[in-house]
Image: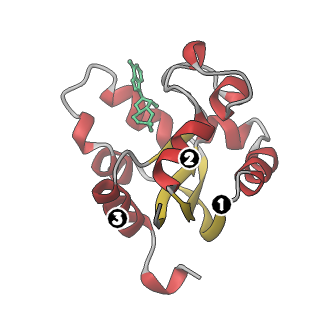
Amino acid sequence: MAVERTYAMIKPDAVTNGHTGRILSIIQEHGFKIIGLKQKSISPAEAEAFYAVHRERPFYASLVTFMSEGPSVLLVLEREDAIKKWREAMGATNPANAADGTIRKLFAESIERNAAHGSDAPETAAQEIQFFFSASELL
Ligand code: CMP
């Protein structure tokens, strides 16, 4: 399995509730190398563009408001099979369905306020990394 990169976020609910440190520890325990890391308040316009694929969904406006309500931690993670491994570590989108020990089971508040984000495919990972990071920020 090839080494690949994925885009990850610790969302405003988890940052505001003080879970950043524990989630970063879990990331490292799962063998990810942190290639990029910054804390940033995402603007409503950035949240709209980042989640544009969901613009027809009934939760879109609420999702944009949530994602711009406070700081997020933005990450680029690298390891073998990173996209799948990070999605496994996060657990199901809805914390009610997330497996024990996963980030969303431990820290998510609801299907929307679900603590973390991860890219779903290599193409989206490349787009999402580029959306928030310049090449010089990836170390
Ligand atoms: P994420 O993995 O970042 O991708 C899209 C986000 O939309 C998702 O996490 C949740 O924050 C949110 N989301 C997905 N489904 C729903 C839903 N049914 N209701 C509210 N928010 C949702």
According to the picture, the residue beneath numbered tag 1 turns out to be 32
* Residue type pointed to by label 3: Ala
| Drawn side of residue 109 relative to residue 8, left or right | right
Measuring 67% from the left and 23% from the top, which residue is drawn there?
A: 105
Residue count near mark 1 (Cα–Cα under 10 Å), binned few <14, some 14–19, many ≥20:
many
Could you say whether the residue bearing mark 2 is in a helix, strand or loop?
helix
Within 8 Å: ligand 1 and the Cβ of disc 2?
no
Q: Work out whether residue 77 can be spotted.
A: no
| Drawn side of residue 33 relative to residue 42, left or right | right
* Residue type pointed to by label 2: Trp
Measuring 74% from the left and 53% from the top, which residue is drawn there?
A: 24
Whereabouts is ligand 1, in terms of quadrant? Answer: top left
From this view, report whether residue 7 is shown above or below residue 47: below
Report x, y in % for residue 46: 36, 54
From this view, report whether residue 113 is shown above or below residue 16: above
Within 8 Å: ligand 1 and the Cβ of disc 3?
no
Instruction: Classify residue 77 by image quadrant.
Output: bottom right
Q: Earlier in the sequence, mark 3 or mark 2?
A: 2
**Gap between marks 3 and 1 measured at Cα:** 17 Å
Front residue of this view, candidates 91 and 38? 91
* Contact, mark 3 vs mark 2 (Cβ under 8 Å): no
Report x, y in % for residue 119: 41, 49
Q: Earlier in the sequence, mark 3 or mark 1?
A: 1
* Residue type pointed to by label 1: Phe
Could you say whether the residue bearing mark 3 is in a helix, strand or loop?
helix
Q: Residue furthest bottom?
A: 136
Camera-near label (3 vs 2) is 2
Q: Which mark is residue 126?
A: 3
| Drawn side of residue 37 relative to residue 76, left or right | right
According to the picture, the residue beneath numbered tag 2 turns out to be 86
Measuring 43% from the left and 79% from the top, which residue is drawn there?
A: 134
* Contact, mark 2 vs mark 1 (Cβ under 8 Å): yes
